[in-house]
Image (cartoon, grey):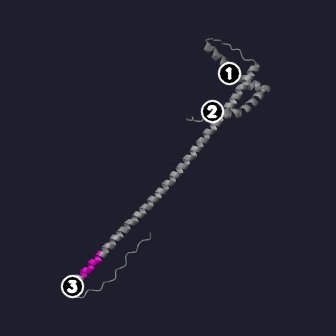
């Protein structure tokens, strides 16, 4: 049996709705009790909502009435309090979504900074390793040249000995004593 994806968005919305319902209910009760709140906060949106709803319904049914009877004060206060409660719930959910968006942006930014830092570090390591490789290649070339030079020196000495021996044989002189080999060139420090 395959389990579908867990509906996190629905669960999140329901959680926000459950948390913000008590707040909305308290504000509704305050709106019903306070004359100022009822008159200036609840009634105008409720009457506007009623007017738009009735006008839309009338047009859908084909009537073209100019005058729409306003709601009585009690019904308008109830509708306005409900609209206010829904607006509060919507505002809470919207602010949570906005905060989550900002958190995701911050997380992406941090990850990008970490990625760039890692990339710079790796680039510095590659540059350092390239420099070390160049130095090692130079040392290897120098070592190969020294080895070749030592081989040429040894061959030259051997040819000189052979030449000296040939000359001594022609003159009938005793062979000269071998001279000590000159010191090798000093190696540069690694």
| Residue 190 placement (x, y as % from top left) | 44, 69
**Residue 66 to residue 91: above or below:** above
Mark seen at residue 49 = 1
| Residue 6 placement (x, y as % from top left) | 60, 36
Nearest the eye: 180 or 185:
180
| Mark closer to the chain start, 1 or 3 | 1
Residue found at x 69% / y 19% = 50
On whether residue 78 falls in the magenta region, the answer is: no
| Residue 90 placement (x, y as % from top left) | 66, 31
Where, quadrant-wise, is the N terminus in this rendering? top right
Q: Which residue is mark 3?
A: 169
At label 1, counting other C-alpha atoms closer than 10 Å, the crowd grade (few under 14, some 14-19, many 20 or more) is some
Q: Which residues are magenta?
A: 155-164
Residue 144, image quadrant: bottom left
Q: Which residue is mark 2?
A: 10
Residue 45, image quadrant: top right
Look at the magenta stretch and give its main secondary structure: helix
């Amino acid at each position: 049996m395959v389990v579908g994806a867990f509906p996190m968005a629905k669960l999140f919305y329901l959680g926000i709705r459950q948390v913000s319902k008590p707040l909305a209910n308290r504000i509704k009760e305050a709106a019903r009790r306070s004359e100022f709140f009822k008159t200036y906060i609840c009634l105008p949106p409720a009457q506007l909502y009623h007017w738009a709803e009735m006008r839309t319904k009338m047009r859908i049914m084909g009537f073209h009435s100019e005058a729409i009877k306003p709601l009585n004060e009690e019904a308008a206060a109830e509708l306005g309090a409900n609209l206010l409660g829904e607006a509060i719930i919507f505002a809470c959910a919207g602010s949570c979504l906005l905060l989550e968006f900002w958190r995701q942006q911050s997380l992406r930014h941090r990850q990008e900074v970490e990625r760039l830092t890692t990339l710079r570090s790796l680039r510095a390591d590659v540059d350092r390793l390239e420099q070390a490789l160049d130095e090692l290649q130079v040392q290897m070339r120098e070592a190969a040249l020294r080895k070749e030079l030592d081989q040429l020196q040894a061959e030259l000495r051997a040819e000189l000995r052979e030449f000296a021996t040939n000359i001594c044989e022609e003159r009938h002189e005793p062979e000269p004593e071998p001279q000590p080999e000159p010191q090798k060139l000093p190696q540069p420090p690694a």
